Amino acid sequence: MSRCRVATPLAAILLVAAGVVGCRFDESVPFGIDDRLGGIRPERIVAVGDDFAAGATDGALFAGAQTLSLPALLAAHLADDLLLQPLVSDPGLALDEDDAGRLALVSLVPLALQREPAGTPIVTSPGRSFDNLGVPGALVSESLVVESSATSALGNPFYDLVLGGRGTFAEQAASLDPTLVLLWIGTGDVLRFVAAGGDQPLAPGLPTPVGTFANTYEALLDALIGTGAQIVLFTIPDPRSMPIVSAIPGIVLDLETGEPVMITVIEPILDPVTGEPVVDPVTGDTLLVQRQATVPLLGPAGPLAPDDLVLLDALPLLGEEIGVPASIGGTGIPLPDRAVLDAAEQGEVGAAILGYNQAIAALAAEHDLPLVDVHALVEQLAAGGLVADGVLLTADYARGQAFGLDGARFTPKGYGVVANLVIDALNARYGGSVPHLRTAGLPGTSLLDLP
């Protein structure tokens, strides 16, 4: 296999961003990657999965991000190979809206987003299956049977774009005779529930029951093991640690400044020992004190509790002052259930993720497969971040650079960090010494020229 070199890492990244993904990033490596592969076999990389395998970000699937998806980055770095993907012209196809494209950041403070117009598919009907079989919105629960939107329980149109009726995930992966399979699926089985605020009519049957998830995931894995390929598994991250539920606080913000609205509260002084109101010994009146306080948003059950999480999709509703109490000039109309994740719903999320990851870890151990801990990565990002290639990445919305504007899928820079975790896992399992790819020049979220 021929190997091409570029003058600098930045030049390589620019080539990848333009769709020329056949050159290695790390010019400083003194030996070819072939000398460092050990037992890793990257000759034909195939990805099976959901939004994350597909390279979705900013709430859409579009070529500018697809060419920097995890599978594409690894194919370029490990095999100097071009990965066949169902590319969509920028600004892409929105994951959860019809006739729309990716999200764009209008203003960071106060936060304002807009949807770009829809793009169109530019790589379809390739004459064979795509190497990247990542389908935005794909669910483990239907991964064994779906071939198109017609056989998807939720009518997911991205199955038509990626699978195109040519067979199931496992059938198409087998037809490609892969040497390395990335099985990154399962996040959608809980993320879709979170993004719907736990509203069952919007996320029927989700989160997928742990038993169903474990059995279906194992059957899918068994089918992929039958191809003879090396297989990498990925844990399921917790959406509760993502910006999708932290970008908007549960309190009223000023629409112009983005600062918390403060009100004066008059309340009794409480005895620190008894907790009872303190009474003036002369007059017998209860002593009062004034303090400044924030105002909780209104949710389906009244003022939000401190632990309630507000979804990013609540942003346009808040712009219409829905969820803002009438007493401070709002509409007094509560946020709908789809915009709030309460404590009980958060409990469902936590239980599902724990069960999913236990099942995946057990299968990785049983079959001695490399396991990439995306769950731990997201927790680290949420706990303060990590430095990757000299750049601090965190789970802060937009500023943190790891997550796209949808608050849930990674930016290309974030996918680059995951790619290096895959390289670490492959090196450890197959005795390789492949160096990390450079992530500093991969796109994050541009904050230039923003008000």
Image (spheres, helix red, strand yellow):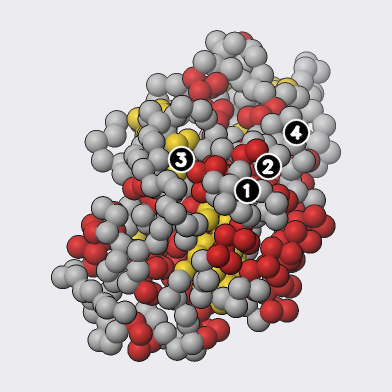
Q: Earlier in the sequence, mark 3 or mark 4?
A: 3
From mark 3 to mark 1, how far is it between C-alphas? 21 Å
Residue mark closest to the camera, 2 vs 4:
2
10 Å neighbourhood of mark 3: few (<14), some, or many (≥20)? many
Quick one: 67 or 451, which is closer to the camera?
A: 67
From mark 4 to mark 1, how far is it between C-alphas? 25 Å
| Residue that carries the numbered disc 1 in the rendered image | 147
- Quadrant position of residue 6: bottom left
**Residue 200: numbered disc:** 4
Left or right: 90 in relation to 39: left
10 Å neighbourhood of mark 4: few (<14), some, or many (≥20)? some
Q: Earlier in the sequence, mark 4 or mark 1?
A: 1
| Residue that carries the numbered disc 2 in the rendered image | 151
Q: For the point 75% across and 33% down, which residue is it? A: 200
Residue mark closest to the camera, 4 vs 1:
1
Q: The residue under label 2 is which amino acid type? A: Thr
Q: Earlier in the sequence, mark 2 or mark 3?
A: 3
Q: For the point 53% across and 54% down, which residue is it? A: 134
| Residue that carries the numbered disc 3 in the rendered image | 60
**Residue 363: numbered disc:** none
